[in-house]
Amino acid sequence: MTIQGDSIPVFGVVAPSGSGKTTLLRRLVAVLHGQGLRVGYLKHAHHTFDLDVSGKDSFEIRAAGASQTLLASRERWALQVENPSRGIDPDLHAMLSRFESERLDLILVEGFKHACYPKIEVYRAALGQAPLYPDDADIIAVATADPLPAPLHPVVLPLDDAQAIADFILSQLAIR
């Protein structure tokens, strides 16, 4: 199963907080970029965040009520849009539609574990939490260095081998 963000292949990494999702994704992005792919990244945050800081003009304008604030420089730009549905998690498909599809080959998603899209679970036994894969058919692989507690499991990938995980993702998305 593959979902597309405006025809861009999408693949995710899910796990409880503190499992190492971001560390794995940082390594995956480096490997995929090194292979010439243009990778987008979407992270689901469970808290409020700001790209700017109090005292800066753009922060103060947004705080005054601007519903969209675009920060632009010679190096990058970032658009902040106030969520009109406060308290409701953003929709994965709506967020994917914000990417510039013509400039990407793949989008890696961190989180959105309840959405239906292909995912790798990061599993660490030391966290003492049950794995997600037994209850989520969209988890098609588990990246771990530990034995898995549930007997029926998807493909197991070596958590410390970003190249092997990147190869798995690419084989699943058929974008090589």
Image (cartoon, rainbow, N blue to C red):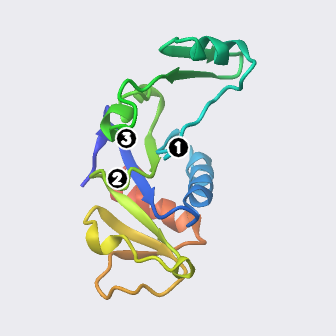
Q: Residue 16, position in %: x, y?
A: 48, 64
Residue depth check, mark 2 versus mark 1: number of the one nearer the observer: 1
Q: Residue 7, position in %: x, y?
A: 31, 35
Is residue 109 shown above or below 78?
below
Residue at screen point 44% across, 39% down? 105
Q: Quadrant of the N terminus?
A: bottom left
Residue at screen point 38% across, 33% down? 95
State the mark number for residue 174: 2
Q: Earlier in the sequence, mark 2 or mark 3?
A: 3
Q: Amino acid at mark 2?
A: Ala
State the mark number for residue 65: none
Quadrant for residue 93, please give it: top left
Front residue of 41 and 32: 41
Q: Amino acid at mark 1?
A: His
Q: Residue 150, position in %: x, y?
A: 34, 85
Is residue 6 shown above or below 132?
above
Extreme residue in the right direction: 55
- Position of 174 compared to 54: left or right? left
| Mark 3, secondary structure of its residue | loop
Residue carrying label 1: 47
Q: Residue 94, position in %: x, y?
A: 33, 32
Residue carrying label 3: 89
Q: CA distance from mark 3 to mark 1?
A: 10 Å
Front residue of 21 and 59: 59
Tally of marks: 3
Front residue of 155 and 91: 91
Q: Earlier in the sequence, mark 3 or mark 1?
A: 1
- Position of 173 compared to 56: left or right? left
